[in-house]
Every structure is written in structure tokens, then in C-alpha cells.
Image (cartoon, rainbow, N blue to C red):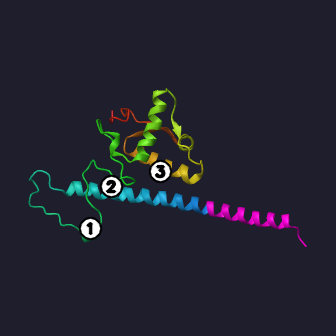
């Protein structure tokens, strides 16, 4: 007959394996979600760019009428500088305040602004996760990497070396864009 301690160890080992399997699955799903969110963002930007090109601007195209598509009825139009949390990142331009970004993006900018102020180098996403007090696991790091890459694409951050991020030229403190 097996000992009680031996049975407990077997059950503990089984539970540990199950936890590891679930964590791996959660990391895979988180990475897949980040990729899908990035693709969705790119399509949203493309649609808005097409809307901008097709929109009548000065009367030259006054006879052009854009009819709303029923499929876009659930996509509310927003002012160009308004950004909803966890949705879009505004393209950086001089005098654009950090407040147009969601809190997560502002947090990344603040961490990098602190590094610049202290004359320290760029940060990796793993280092950012540690600075933010997050668990440094692939899902968290990839979520930060996705956000940092989005900020690079919109001109807020620079990536001087692969995987290392710093504020872009001209981007300064949280009060404004420059």
C-alpha cells in the first residue's frame, strides 16, 4: 500500500503539470490575441486613411457623396485626436499631449522619459515588465512589446536596436508632445 505522503506527492505533481500546461496555453492565447489586435488596428487605420482620402475637403469634390456602409454602423466615428483606451494610438506630432494615449501607453512613455532624464539607455520589454512590477512571463512581455512597437510605428518611441526602446527624437515630458 502506498504511503499517504507518496500519494500527496503524486497529486501535487499532477496539479503542477496541469498548471504548467494551462500557463503555456494562456501564453499562446495571449500572443495570438496581441497579433490579432495588431492586425485589427492596422485595418482600422487603413479604413480611416481611405475615409480621409475620399472625404470631401474643399468644395472641389462637393458633388461627391459618401454613403455610410451598414457594416460600419457599429464602428463609431471619433474626432481625430480622441483616442479610446486600448484601441488606437494617435500619430505623434509636436504639441500633442500624452493624455491622448491610454494609461498603459502613458506608463511606457513615463518609464522611458525617466530613463532619458537619468541619462540611462533604452529599455527592453522584459526590463519594462520588471519596472512595472509585472511577472516577467512571455504573455506580459509580448503585450508590452506590442504596445511599444505600436508607439514606434506612431512616432512616440524609437527602437535604436532590435527590442530596445527609448523616446523618439522630439518627444519629451508628459505635459506635451515636445
Earlier in the chain: of badge 3 and badge 2, it is 2
Residue 129 spot, x, y in % from top left: 55, 44
Q: Which residue is mark 1?
A: 73
* Horizontal relation, residue 42 to residue 76: left or right: right
Residue in the image at 34% along x and 53% along y: 84
Query: Which region shows up in magenta?
Result: 1-23
- Asked if residue 91 can be seen in this view, the reply is no
Mark sitting earlier along the chain (3/1)? 1
Residue 78 falls in which quadrant of the image?
A: bottom left
Q: Position of residue 114 (x, y in %)?
A: 47, 32
Residue reaching furthest bottom?
1
Residue tagged 2? 45
Q: Nearer the viewer, residue 136 or 69?
A: 136
In this image, 150 relative to 142: left or right?
left
C-alpha separation, residue under disc 2 versus residue under disc 1: 17 Å
Residue 105 sits in which quadrant?
top left
The residues bearing labels 3 and 2 have C-alpha atoms spaced at a distance of: 16 Å
Identify the element where label 1 is drawn: loop
Q: Establish if 64 lies above or below 113.
A: below
Which residue is at a point 41% across and 42% down the rendered structure image?
Answer: 106
Return the residue found at the far top.
119
Q: Report the quarter where the C terminus lies.
A: top left
- Locate residue 5, reporting x and y percent: 84, 64
Badge 2 or badge 1: first in the primary sequence: 2
- Label of residue 146 in the image: 3
State if disc 1 and disc 2 touch (CB < 8 Å). Answer: no
The residue lying toward the viewer, choosing from 79 and 175, is 175
Q: Residue furthest right?
A: 1
- Is any atom of residue 5 visible in this view? yes
- The question of residue 17 being in magenta is answered with yes
Residue 53 numbered mark, or none: none
Amino acid at each position: 500500500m502506498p504511503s499517504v505522503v507518496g500519494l500527496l506527492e503524486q497529486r501535487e505533481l499532477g496539479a503542477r503539470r496541469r498548471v504548467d500546461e494551462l500557463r503555456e496555453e494562456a501564453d499562446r492565447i495571449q500572443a495570438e490575441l496581441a497579433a490579432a489586435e495588431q492586425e485589427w488596428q492596422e485595418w482600422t487605420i487603413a479604413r480611416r486613411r481611405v475615409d480621409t482620402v475620399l472625404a470631401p475637403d474643399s468644395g472641389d469634390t462637393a458633388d461627391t457623396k459618401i454613403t455610410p456602409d451598414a457594416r460600419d454602423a457599429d464602428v463609431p466615428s471619433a474626432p481625430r485626436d480622441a483616442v479610446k483606451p486600448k484601441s488606437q494610438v494617435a500619430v505623434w506630432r509636436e504639441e500633442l499631449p500624452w493624455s491622448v494615449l491610454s494609461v498603459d501607453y502613458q506608463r511606457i512613455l513615463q518609464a522611458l522619459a525617466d530613463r532619458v532624464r537619468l541619462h540611462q539607455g533604452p529599455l527592453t520589454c522584459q526590463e519594462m515588465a520588471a519596472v512595472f512590477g509585472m511577472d516577467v512571463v512571455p504573455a506580459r512581455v509580448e503585450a508590452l512589446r506590442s504596445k511599444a512597437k505600436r508607439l514606434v510605428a506612431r512616432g512616440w518611441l524609437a527602437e535604436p536596436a532590435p527590442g530596445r526602446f527609448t523616446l523618439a527624437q522630439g518627444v519629451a515630458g508628459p505635459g506635451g508632445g515636445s
